[in-house]
């Protein structure tokens, strides 16, 4: 993951795939040290990437929404996020999260025995994420090696070799202890569902200022309203309509902070037909009225 130059948001394409290049073709690895609190709305918003990701909570407590699961992670714990799994991090305070994002091809060549026997099975499994706690011996070992990876990035001497050596230790530990017996069809089904979710979310992002119904959202991927509702509930823990309203409110918050447009005009331009409902919903989400938000 990586913010843009303003250190405020994730850059994604129309499918919510992150567009930032993590490392280079010759060395597809990148280390970041970020504070969730400094991103827009104190969250690293929904995105996914083909690379895998390991995150460590150095300070604070944050909520991690990964695929269909939701986790509260505290200081000293960590998380693995599998390839092509949609995720979002949010916090109510400063949360420092050193993290690494890298291509699995860094571990071994795709046509090698190592890759087919130890890398591909985990990528193809239906494991969306794994939580690491220092209370469990093998997970403590993963965290220890992860911290070593971070430390190595400050050293210029054979940094790349040391990094790959540590990544192989981490991967071997995860492979040896995680339950990766899930079938490939299950993983494919999950990927298909996530793709549907991404398309519906992007439809909302593009058309939030218009009159949108649940039926409209479901129609973008040719599924029933109940199926759309179930997908949003499973992965985002919110209904499609609630997601739409929250997205409209966040767009309104940006306009309040960056323009002199009237509250009535902003409400109308972000899809709210009733300014009273807009003001009530805004205060419920942000804790202050639109006028107080603008003033502050």
Image (tube, rainbow, N blue to C red):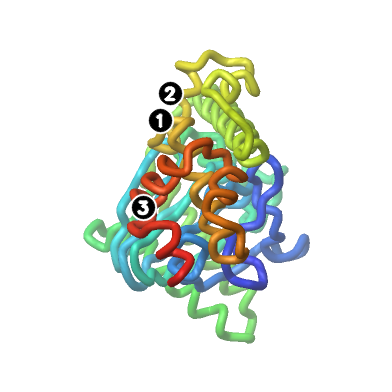
Provide the residue designation for mark 2: 230
Residue at horizontal 38 percent and vertical 43 percent from the top: 178
> Marks 2 and 1: in contact by CB < 8 Å?
yes
Query: For this rendering, which residue is in front, 288 or 61?
Result: 288
Q: Residues within 10 Å of mark 1 (few under 14, many from 20)?
A: some
- Name, please, the residue furthest toward the left: 135
* Residue 143 locus on image (x, y percent): 37, 65
> Marks 2 and 3: in contact by CB < 8 Å?
no
Provide the residue designation for mark 1: 233
Q: Which mark is residue 283?
A: 3
Question: Which quadrant holds residue 103?
Answer: bottom right
- Give the CA distance from mark 1 to mark 3: 24 Å
Left or right: 195 with respect to 279? right
- For the N terminus, the image quarter is bottom right
Examine the rendered structure and indicate whether residue 203 appears above or below residue 254: above
The answer to whether residue 146 of the structure is visible from this angle is no
């Amino acid at each position: 993951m990586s913010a843009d130059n303003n250190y405020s948001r994730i850059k994604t394409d129309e499918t919510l795939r992150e567009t930032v290049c993590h490392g280079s073709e010759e060395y597809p690895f990148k280390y970041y040290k970020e504070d969730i609190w400094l991103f827009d709305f104190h969250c690293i918003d929904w995105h996914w990437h083909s690379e895998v990701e390991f995150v460590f909570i150095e300070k604070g407590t944050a909520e991690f929404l990964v695929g269909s699961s939701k986790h509260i992670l505290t200081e000293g714990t960590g998380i693995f996020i599998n390839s092509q799994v949609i995720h979002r991090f949010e916090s109510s305070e400063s949360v420092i999260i050193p993290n690494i994002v890298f291509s699995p091809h860094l571990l071994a060549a795709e046509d090698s025995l190592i890759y087919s026997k130890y890398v591909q099975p985990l990528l193809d499994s239906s494991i969306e994420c794994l939580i690491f706690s220092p209370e469990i011996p093998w997970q403590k070992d993963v965290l220890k090696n992860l911290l070593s990876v971070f430390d190595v990035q400050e050293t210029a001497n054979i940094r790349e070799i040391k990094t790959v050596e540590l990544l192989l230790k981490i991967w071997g530990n995860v492979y040896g202890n995680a339950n990766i017996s899930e079938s490939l069809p299950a993983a494919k089904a999950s990927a298909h569902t996530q793709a549907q979710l991404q398309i519906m979310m992007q439809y909302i992002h593009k058309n939030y200022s218009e009159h949108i119904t649940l039926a409209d959202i479901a129609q973008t991927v040719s599924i029933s309203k109940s199926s759309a509702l179930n997908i949003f509930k499973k992965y985002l823990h919110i209904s499609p309509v609630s997601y739409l309203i929250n997205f409209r409110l966040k767009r309104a918050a940006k306009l309040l902070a960056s323009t002199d447009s009237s509250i009535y005009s902003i409400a109308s331009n972000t899809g709210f037909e009733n300014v009273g409902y807009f003001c009530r919903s805004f205060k419920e989400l942000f804790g202050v009225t639109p006028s107080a938000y603008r003033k502050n």
